[in-house]
C-alpha cells in the first residue's frame, strides 16, 4: 500500500516555480533539484513563495548550499514576492524512483516510459 506521503500531490507544484528551480543543481550528481525529484511542494500564496525540498541523503554536506541556491533563484525570479520560504523536509524519504524521465535521460538511462 502506498503511503499518502510517498507522492506529493502534483497540484502543489507550481510550474513557474519548478521552472525557476531547474537552475538549482545538486553539484554531486549534476542534475537540477527538479529533475532529481527533490521538490515536494512549490506553491504561491498572496504572502509568499513556499517550497519544500529534500536531499538525496540527510547527511548531504551540500544541503545548506542547495537550499540557499534555491532561495536565491526564487528571489531573482520572484523579486516582488513578499516572502520566500524554502524548507528542508525529510518526509517522505527521497528515492531514485522520484527522478524525472528527463533526469534519467541526462544520466544516460532510459526514461521509464521507454523502459
Image (spheres, helix red, strand yellow):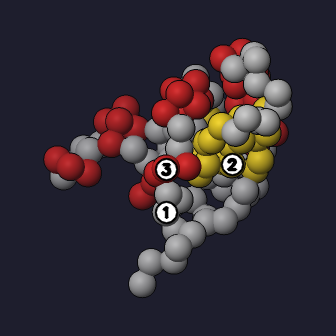
The residue closer to the viewer here, 83 or 34, is 83
Circles 2 and 1, Cβ within 8 Å, touching? The answer is: no
Q: Gap between marks 3 and 2, in whole Å?
A: 14 Å
Percent x, y for residue 26? 61, 35
Mark 2 or mark 1, which has the lower sequence index?
A: 1
Circles 3 and 1, Cβ within 8 Å, touching? The answer is: no
Percent x, y for residue 29? 55, 37
**Which residue position is annotated with label 1?**
7
Picture layout, residue 20 above or below residue 86: above
Q: Residue at x 76, y 17 (%)?
A: 80
Circles 3 and 2, Cβ within 8 Å, touching? The answer is: no
Observer-side mark, 3 or 2, equals 3
Observer-side mark, 3 or 1, equals 3
Mark 3 or mark 2, which has the lower sequence index?
A: 3
**Which residue position is annotated with label 2?**
52
Percent x, y for residue 59? 75, 55
Amino acid at each position: 500500500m502506498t503511503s499518502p506521503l510517498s507522492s506529493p500531490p502534483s497540484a502543489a507544484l507550481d510550474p513557474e516555480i519548478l521552472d525557476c528551480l531547474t537552475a538549482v543543481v545538486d553539484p554531486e550528481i549534476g542534475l537540477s533539484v527538479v529533475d532529481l525529484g527533490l521538490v515536494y511542494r512549490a506553491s504561491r500564496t498572496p504572502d509568499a513563495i513556499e517550497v519544500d525540498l529534500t536531499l538525496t541523503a540527510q547527511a548531504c554536506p551540500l544541503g545548506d548550499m542547495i537550499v540557499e541556491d534555491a532561495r536565491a533563484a526564487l528571489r531573482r525570479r520572484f523579486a516582488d514576492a513578499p516572502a520566500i520560504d524554502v524548507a528542508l523536509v525529510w518526509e517522505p524519504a527521497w528515492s531514485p524512483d522520484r527522478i524525472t524521465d528527463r533526469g534519467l535521460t541526462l544520466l544516460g538511462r532510459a526514461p521509464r516510459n521507454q523502459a
